[in-house]
Image (cartoon, grey):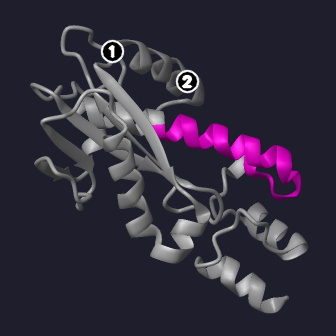
Amino acid sequence: MPELIVPAGLVCGIDEAGRGPLAGAVVAAAVILDPLRPIPGLNDSKKLSEKKRDALAVLIRERAVAWAVASASVEEIDRLNILHATMLAMQRAVAALSVRPTGAMVDGNRCPKLDIPCEAVVKGDGKIASIAAASILAKTVRDADMLALHAQYPMYGFDRHMGYPTAAHFQALEEHGASPVHRRSFGPVAKQLSLL
């Protein structure tokens, strides 16, 4: 497992979950880690098992200097587009931190507009510990949200694919049409709506 860098000072790591799915909100997290309370095993959430992510999410909440999770709704995604909605969710996560960060490092190649210095780090969730922590919180919260939506709309199988565009999801869309939690601005959903 790679040795991830813990940024010095009150620098928050930011990451998101849920840019690609056809349904549900996009979720972002911001985390300021405490170098004196290390969390072994942090990594890009996509490289961890669900069990490991869930266990790490508990440790992150316990040991981080500050953490926050925020989202942008399906309506906001459709109105703004997914990129701008993702940036909005990131801004909300940083604003919700209980400790004001002095800087931010964000996974990817774009920074949200913040009133603190921000650095974009490509594949940052595999390099920077606080970004990895943010990726874990964003992913676990979004998965829990999708399980709640599955209880409301069981016919789509959100508990299995979390809203991502899988063959089973396309089939469910074809059979049942789009639900209120589907992103109407996304091609496959728009296509389905045009067929109705």
Which residue in the rendered view is the most extreme toward the top?
36
Q: Residue at x 32, y 19 (%)?
A: 64
Question: Mark 1 or 2 closer to N-term?
Answer: 1
Residue under numbered circle 1: 39
Which range of residues does the magenta coloring cover? Answer: 138-159
**152 falls in the magenta region:** yes
Question: Mark 2, residues whose alpha carbon is within 10 Å: few (<14), some, or many (≥20)?
Answer: some
Q: Residue at x 23, y 59 (%)?
A: 113
Q: Position of residue 68 (x, y in %)?
A: 40, 34
Mark 1, secondary structure of its residue = loop
Q: Position of residue 189 (x, y in %)?
A: 69, 77
In the rendered image of this protein, does residue 64 appear above or below residue 164?
above
Residue under numbered circle 2: 54
In the rendered image of this protein, does residue 181 appear above or below residue 66?
below
**112 falls in the magenta region:** no
Q: Position of residue 184 (x, y in %)?
A: 65, 77
- Decide if residue 170 is on the left or right side of residue 133: right
Magenta region's main secondary structure?
helix
The image quarter in which residue 6 lies:
top left
